Amino acid sequence: MHLSHRNVLMSSALMSSVLPLASVGNARGRAGAKPKRSVDLTQFISVTDLEIAARERLDPMGWALVDGGAADETTIRWNREAFEQLRLRNRVLVDVSKIDTQLTLFGTTLAHPILLAPTAYHRMIHDGGEIETARGADQAEALFVVSSASTTRIGPIAAATHQPLWFQMYVQSDRGFVKDVVAEVEQAGCRALVVTVDAPVVGPRYRQIRAKFKLTPGLELPYMLDINRRRDSILRGGNNRMNWEEIEWLQSITRLPVLLKGILDPDDAVRALEQRVAGIIVSNHGGRMLDTAQASLIALRAVAARIDGRVPVLMDGGIRRGTDVLKALACGASAVLIGRPYLHGLAVAGSAGVAKTVAILREELEQAMALTGRTQLTAIEKSVLWE
């Protein structure tokens, strides 16, 4: 992200509230993060504040991992611009004394529609890694989608939260290995499989390449067999032979709902319905794969129109405000996922930073619902927007 002049001015004020103390945990020169310092989280008013602090916390390689995208990072910019171009229609004299953000997905009741997207290599961002993220999800009453690129096995992650977990899969080329992973995540209590389908290869992540990105020595990726077999080429991707038949096979070996993540084209969404998937996540991988791909919010409107409520449609990409969540729901999303924002919180203050990120967005969503006269999620539809 290119920080605005206002953000640069804010940075010094925010950093003055972060007092150096003894290192928390043991970084031992770990790539990605600088030594930990205690943080007064009351000083962080918006998720942008946490982003500024995270940039101060992370070294260049860690910042490139969290914030970087593909090529010129045009799609990252378009993700934000799509939200900024939509105008909300405020309504007045509505009783908004009670705001209800609950929803149900695949039989599970959630406190709010803000989910933690699958993101990689959390132990390069905070020593506690995915366990610390899970603790933050627990505090925030948020569903956490654990990545295949986790640096921690699913069992300890599941033990760290009372909130639901989903597991995101990069389906590896070895089917026996995939079966073992599915059995493990089912045993851990995960409630859905999210299959990322937009990454047959990895996009040109020039920021990471320039930062000479590599995994910290000693970190393990227990669910990424294809990458583990060629750790010198971690930015090249995994199973590039994956196709619709692989999805059908995966559905045959699990009792869990299977969602496809990375759908942008409505024709692919219709094909997914024909495949009887349980849900779709509209995503351009946070602008990290195909640069100049369509903004997720724009694609969401087209996909949701074609799906017409037959399965839940979720989206990620560019969420930075509670008003963004409201706009996504108005465009047809059942829920949204955030990635970079909670990673910024994780870098700044571990589980407390993750929880703070979600709390900010949840409060902003409730404020936006009240100001648009919507007291529950089912009342949010396209009339919330100025056309």
Image: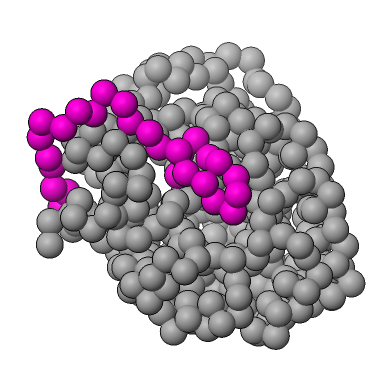
| Quarter in which the C terminus is drawn | bottom left
Magenta span: 87-114
Whether 48 is drawn above or below 220: the answer is above
Q: Is residue 135 above or below residue 242?
A: above
Q: Which residue shows up at 31% across the image and 26% down it?
A: 98
Q: Residue at x 69, y 51 (%)?
A: 191
User: Is residue 252 found left or right of 276 in the rendered image?
Assistant: right
Query: In the displayed structure, does residue 315 sit left or right of residue 387?
Result: right
**Image-based side of 96 in relation to 307, left or right:** left
Is there any visible trace of residue 12 in the rendered image? no
Q: Main secondary structure of the magenta part?
A: loop
The coloring applied to the image is one colour
Q: Position of residue 74 (x, y in %)?
A: 34, 67
In percent of width and height, residue 368 lies at: 25, 37
Residue 50 or residue 251, whichever sits in front: 251
Which residue is nearer to you in this view: 46 or 53? 46
Residue 358 showing in the rendered view: yes
Query: Residue at left 34%, top 39%?
Result: 376
Up-down relation of residue 33 to residue 166 (above or below): above
Q: Is residue 200 left or right of residue 11?
A: right
Residue 193 in percent (x, y) is at 67, 60
